[in-house]
Amino acid sequence: MILGAKRLAIAASLLLLATGSWWLTRTVSVPEKIFDGKLRHDPDYTVENFNVTVMDAQGRRHYTLSAVHLIHYGDDGSSNLNQPYLVQYREGSPPVHTRADKGWMPKDRSEIILEGNTISSRGRDPRRAGGDIRVDKMKILLDR
């Protein structure tokens, strides 16, 4: 009788473990990743000799931006620029000219990040001396 009870206990334990393993594989399985292309960072269009002028609320030039090559990415709306050239206009002061090897703009176009041989120049006027800034990387807020 004792031998039969031991076999029954072992069989019940094995059945319980098998049921637990089956349940665990059903509930804790890793979902399969379905590749639908939404996570790809591919360009949706490119522009050669890109040039844009942005106006302020009064209709005056706020800034002009040009580049040898613009690459736009549809997944996040960002743009890469090759050899960007930015001219910022402010009332009562000379324009600020900025050049770089490459640049990046987010979807909202509120800023531009310039990298590689970045040179920003402001001409002199009667109130201020002009000057140059030379850096490897610069972030410019365009809405200000």
Image (cartoon, rainbow, N blue to C red):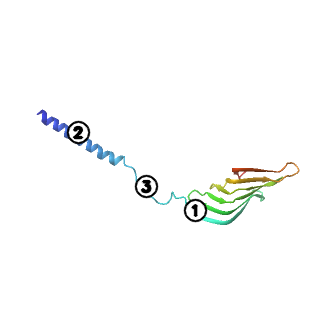
* Distance from Cα at disc 3 to Cα at disc 2: 36 Å
Specify the quadrant that holds the N terminus: top left
Residue 101 numbered mark, or none: none
Q: Nearer the viewer, residue 20 or 67?
A: 67
Q: Residue furthest bottom?
A: 48
Q: In this image, 121 relative to 127: left or right?
A: left
Q: Nearer the viewer, mark 2 or mark 1?
A: 1
Against 95, residue 5 (above or below) is above
- The secondary structure type at the circle numbered 2 is helix
Q: Quadrant of the rendered structure where residue 77 is?
A: bottom right
Which amino acid is tagged 1?
Answer: Pro
Tell me which label, 2 or 1, sits earlier in the chain.
Answer: 2
Which amino acid is tagged 3?
Answer: Lys
- At which x and y percent is residue 125? 86, 52
- At which x and y percent is residue 143? 71, 52
User: Does the rendering let one see residue 138?
Assistant: no
Residue picked out by circle 1: 43
Which amino acid is tagged 2?
Answer: Ser
Tell me which label, 1 or 3, sits earlier in the chain.
Answer: 3
Residue picked out by circle 3: 33
Q: Residues within 10 Å of mark 3 (few under 14, many from 20)?
A: few
* Distance from Cα at disc 1 to Cα at disc 3: 23 Å
- Tell me if label 3 and label 2 are in contact, CB under 8 Å: no
- At which x and y percent is residue 142? 71, 53
